Structures are given as C-alpha cells and as structure tokens.
C-alpha cells in the first residue's frame, strides 16, 4: 500500500496486487482526511495588484497581506488558511475594514450617494491608491473670483443692491487675503536684502514711502504718513498728511530743512511710486 494523490489533488491510498506474467493491477480507495481547522477564503486572481483589493461577493471573512489596510489589528498565533494549490499558511492577525456596505453607500438621510459594480470575476474592487481631496471656499471668496476679483467692499454693495442677477446678499466679516490680487498689485519683484550701505555720505540717497489712509485719524484730521530714511545714517523723518496729494509739498519742505541743517545736497531718492 502506498499513499498518493489523484488528479483532483485529493490524497488516496493506492493498493497494488501482483497478477500472473508479472503484471500488476492497482485500484484506489478513499482515505479519511486528517482533522484540521481551516477557514475558507475566496480570492481573486488579481489580489497581487499593489494598492488594490478584490473582495468576494459572498465571503464571511477576507484576507490580505497588507496590514496597513486594516484597523484595530489583533495579533493571532492560531489558525491556518489553505490556498487553491494545497499550500497552507498561518494567520498572524485579524482586523477591521470600514466599508459601510460594499454594494451601496448612503448618507444620513438614506439617499444613495455611491453604488459599486462587480468585476467579471464577481468581486468588488477596493482601490487604496485613489484619493478624494475636498476644499471649502467661502461664498464671498467665490463671488470675488467670479466677478473679476472685485474689491470686497464693492462686492457687498453690489450684492446688497441687487445689481447683478443671481448674486445673493453677502456679509464679509473677515476679509480673506486673495493671493492673485496681491501678486497683481505688485509693480516688480521684491529686492534682495543687502548687508552693505550703498551710499558714502549723508543725503546721498533717501528712501521714501507713503502709508495710508489709516482708519484712525489724528486730532487734526491727518490719516496719511510720509516716511523718509537716509541710507547712510539711517536717520528717519516722519510727516503726517491729510491727503496723499500733500506729499510733494511736504517733501519740498523736508528737502529745504535737511539740506540747510546738514550742509549736503540731496543727490538721489528711491521710492516705490506710492
């Protein structure tokens, strides 16, 4: 008696009997399988694709070789699984995968938001490589972009007056910063910082800037600030103006004053056209 396998891969015992003329005759008998505990699994031929997992349509348990797909993994040293070729392997752990129902996903009100379709091998495909990115843009910001990046103050007036059909009433509490608007207002790229002084004496180069109007006025009603910095000494003059149109008059008075005090002429000035 010898132990062998039939064409279906089932273990059998083969009985051999010797006949006259040195001929042998064999026949097969069924042999009881060794008692063992295994869990049935249904797999797809394409489970080896990285980042994709095919789930059987009628399985009570599924298995994967990627622990990152599962949550709340509990290590396990018991149990084995047997594959189609008769090779068995140990189960190293069990976890959960939240699918919310494979064939259909619904929202809290019960409306269907997503339906699944089976593949040709009657399985559902879970793709772990796909991503869904969601961004939330406020309504004033959307209308600001749709209307050619109009100012938010004008946008509120336009919406509340009902001038444009379809634009609802808008209330802007905190005005968001629009990056395209900031870039569009720049006349040139920013200058790189210099560690050395470009001038060789006082009043050779003056840096000027104009700021305003500011929201809080002075007691004299001035709401603009005129700033002038000497490049060599870093001495700074500050003037307060009612209107921006008063800048040139204030600059002429400043020139006469500093040239008289320092005894040097102003050679050049630098401004951002403010």
Image (cartoon, rainbow, N blue to C red):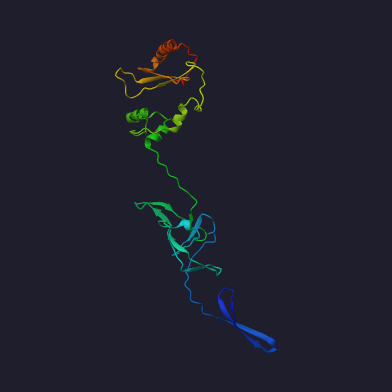
Q: Residue at x 49, y 69 (%)?
A: 80
On screen, residue 140 above or below 230 = below
Name the residue furthest left: 219
- Horizontal and vertical percent for residue 154? 36, 27
Q: Residue at x 69, y 87 (%)?
A: 22
Which of 222 and 45 lies nearest the eye of the viewer? 222
On screen, residue 86 above or below 208 = below
Name the residue furthest right: 21
- Horizontal and vertical percent for residue 264? 47, 12
Q: Quadrant of the N terminus?
A: bottom right
- Horizontal and vertical percent for residue 146? 42, 33
- Horizontal and vertical percent for residue 100? 40, 56
Which of 100 and 3 lies nearest the eye of the viewer? 3
Q: Quadrant of the C terminus?
A: top left
Quarter of image, res 97: bottom left
Which of 270 and 66 lies nearest the eye of the viewer? 270
Instruction: Please count the marks in the image.
Output: 0
Quarter of image, res 217: top left
On screen, residue 37 above or below 201 = below
Q: Residue at x 64, y 84 (%)?
A: 25
């Amino acid at each position: 008696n010898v132990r062998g396998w039939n064409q279906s891969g089932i273990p059998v015992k083969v009985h051999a009997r010797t006949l006259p003329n040195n001929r042998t005759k064999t026949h097969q008998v069924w042999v009881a399988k060794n008692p063992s505990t295994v869990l049935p699994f249904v797999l797809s031929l394409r489970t080896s694709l990285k980042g994709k997992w095919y789930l059987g349509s009628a399985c009570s348990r599924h298995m994967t070789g990627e622990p990152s797909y599962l949550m709340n993994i509990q290590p396990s040293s018991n149990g084995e699984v047997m594959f189609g070729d008769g090779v068995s392997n140990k189960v190293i752990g069990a976890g959960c995968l939240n699918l919310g129902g494979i064939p259909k996903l619904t929202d809290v009100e019960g409306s269907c938001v997503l339906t699944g379709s089976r593949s040709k091998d009657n399985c559902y495909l879970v793709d772990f490589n796909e991503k869904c990115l969601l961004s939330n843009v406020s309504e004033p910001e959307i209308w600001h972009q749709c209307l050619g990046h109009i100012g938010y103050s004008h946008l509120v007036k336009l919406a509340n007056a009902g001038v444009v059909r379809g634009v609802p009433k808008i209330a802007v509490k905190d005005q968001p910063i629009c990056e395209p608007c900031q870039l569009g207002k720049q006349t040139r790229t920013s200058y790189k910082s210099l560690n050395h002084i470009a001038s060789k004496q006082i009043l050779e180069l003056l840096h000027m800037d104009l700021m305003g109007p500011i929201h809080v006025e002075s007691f004299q009603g001035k709401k603009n600030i005129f700033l002038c910095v000497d490049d060599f000494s870093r001495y700074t003059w500050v003037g307060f103006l009612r209107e921006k149109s008063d800048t040139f008059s204030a600059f002429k008075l400043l020139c006469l004053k500093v040239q008289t005090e320092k005894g040097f002429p102003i050679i050049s000035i630098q401004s951002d056209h403010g």
